Amino acid sequence: MEFCSEHDAYKFYFGYAKYHGFGVRKDEVGYDKNHNIVMRQFLCNKAGLRDKKHFIRDDRKKKHRPLTRTNCKAKLRVHLDEKIGKWKVVSFEASHNHIRCEDKYVSLIPTYRGLSTTDKAQVDLLHAQGVRTCHIMGFMMEQKGDNDAMFFSRYVVGEEGELKHLFWSDGTSRSDFQCFGDVVAFDSTYKKNKYNKPLVIFSGKNHHSQTVIFGCCVVSDETIETYKWVLETFLDAMCNKEPKSIVTDGDGAMWEAIKQVFPNATHRLCGWHLQKNACQNVKNSNFLADFKRAMYGNFSSSGNFSSTEFEKFWQELVVKHEVQDNNWVNEVYRKRGMWAHAYLRDKFFAGIRTTSLCEGINSCIKTYIRRKNTIVELLYNFEHSLRDFRYNELVSDYNSLYTEPVLTSSLRKIERQAANLFTRNIFKQVASEIITAGSLNVTNKFEVEDKVCFKVDKFCERDWEHNVGYDKEEGKFVCDCMMYEFCGIPCSHIICVMRYEHMECFPSSLICKRWLKDAKSSYMSSFESEVEDTDMMVMARFALLAACCNSLCSIAAKKCDSFNFVRNEVLKLKEQLDKKLQLNENIEKNDSCDPNVVKTKGAPVTKKKKKNSRKCSNCKKSGHFITCPAVVSQQHDVSEINGVCGSESASITSARHKVKLFCWI
């Protein structure tokens, strides 16, 4: 192959690499005797290895960055043929020693993280008009959007035609639920639309332990019947798959609806709401610390974990803080099976103990959603906020699949297996347990029936003890801390026993599939086979059309006449395509009217603290912001003295005038 310049050669290899899923890095440069470039070499971005000195530094303070290089040998080398003035390919290595990026991750490779010339011009124009950056990104994403064949929605209309309830869930949310719908956080938020209708959000955790949204619903009230309709609609949208565990804020109507629709699900009350209620109902500052231990403690006595220990602790807590007659304390005790970890630690909750997932979502969607939004605007803006969550998942997928962590423990084989199996965020938790296992010891081993039991203690803490059981036939471990049963992460006590037994890898019973890198692959592969156009084909067609339009736009934008001509022709072409594809033929017409403004339950109104007024740093008083009167008075006195004392005092005053008299806080 021949190229007119080294830049053309780079552009060719750049496009080739992007299509095949790897990045490009410029490498060697060759010069002639006149210091002109006559040779260029381009490498795969994974060429080379990190210098070993970075792994053995004793003064390291920061954690190791993930490894991105694999010593890949793929390259392209070109030389300048001075006789014909062309650059010729003299060496090309096509094979790689690593997996190539899938199409959806290519944009995350550092080489390709940038905007095209057209996109940059559009961003600059919108910035000049005062449009916020987040809205600019949302607008550009909307331009690249498409229809969702799996979108699900259902609504209820009142007697006068007003919209009462509206539920929706897009295809990505529905597929996410099939993979991670074993645990659901269910909460309502307020003041997200002009009708004051509560926004109910179903959320959970994905395989990166990040927030994922399963569906949303706008409701007109918060009665049992309404929540029952919401849950039944949610069940229909998710192909009748029920969650195993549900976390709510403790609303009575929610609780009753969950019991009717999901009778087999384990219902947990949000720990954050319980703590807040404890502060409001018990006027004892020391009560909260003990109450938090009651919520989250395992309660052990000589290595035995049981609810009996909790009951003993609770009785001591009630007597200690003298709350025997407190109605809230007695009521929350009756519900202890829904919030005490001692009763819930053998149920899988993916580590979720609060509805903070929903609270975090509420904080994020404030960027897009305003209180004066209509329902249509709410739907449109909520879609933009969803993209932020999904982009975070895309980045985490890329980091998990195409980078490697630096191994730091002494159990390298076990840690290597964890790094290969689990996503990066989950691996960090597993690696922490592996490191902790280094300070644990097996003190006793004995057999009970067909199981082997181990007693594990901690270095220099003889009173600290855990019991681990191992069934050799089934290859199952059970620890009395129940960490794996609760969040799907192998605990340090089990890893200590594995080290004692010289086991080099985790058995399948300790590998929770929802935390694996390919947790979504089994479901998504079957789903993608049903889609007419694959992402790769759509991406290729879009890229080709975009390239054609970019050059057309660059030419047309230079003159007003050509700009108007091209714009009109494009609009005509779009109208013809709309008619040809009949994009709007499946849209159902409805006669629903605007919803009524409703009064919600909401959170209790709290008095806001009075904002402290701004005070002068000199006299500590408020009411002036530029020059302190005390300083002005001193300056006036100095001026009078200068008038009496003559030229000698005048020089002193001149020096003092250089002192800054402005007082700011």
Image (cartoon, grey):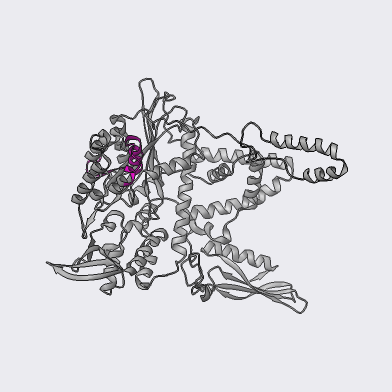
Q: Specify the farthest residue to the front.
A: 645
Q: Is residue 52 above or below residue 582?
A: below
Quarter that holds the C terminus: top right
Residue occupying the point 58% across, 34% down:
613
Q: Is residue 233 above or below residue 310?
A: above
The magenta stretch is 262-289
Residue 436, picture quadrant: bottom left
- The outermost residue toward the top is 160
Q: Is residue 435 above or below residue 339?
A: below
Q: Could you tell me residue 652's position as x and y percent? A: 81, 45
195 horizontally vs 309: left or right: right
Q: Return the residue found at the far right.
A: 647
Query: Looking at the image, which residue sits at the far bottom?
Result: 33
Say which of 422 and 236 sits in front. 422
Can residue 243 be seen in this snapshot? no
Q: Give how far across and how far down residue 528 sits, in percent.
A: 39, 53
Task: Judge by depth and name the residue closer to the eye, 135 or 173.
Answer: 135
Q: Residue at x 47, y 72 (%)?
A: 97
Q: Closer to the camera, 202 or 499?
A: 499
Identified at 35% across, 45% down, the residue is 354
User: Residue 442 versus residue 389: which sits nearer the camera?
Assistant: 442
Above or below, comparing residue 11 to residue 636 in the picture: below
In magenta segment, residue 279: yes
- The quadrant in which the N terminus is found is bottom right
Question: Is 526 situated left or right of 13 in this image?
Answer: left
Q: Is residue 371 magenta?
A: no
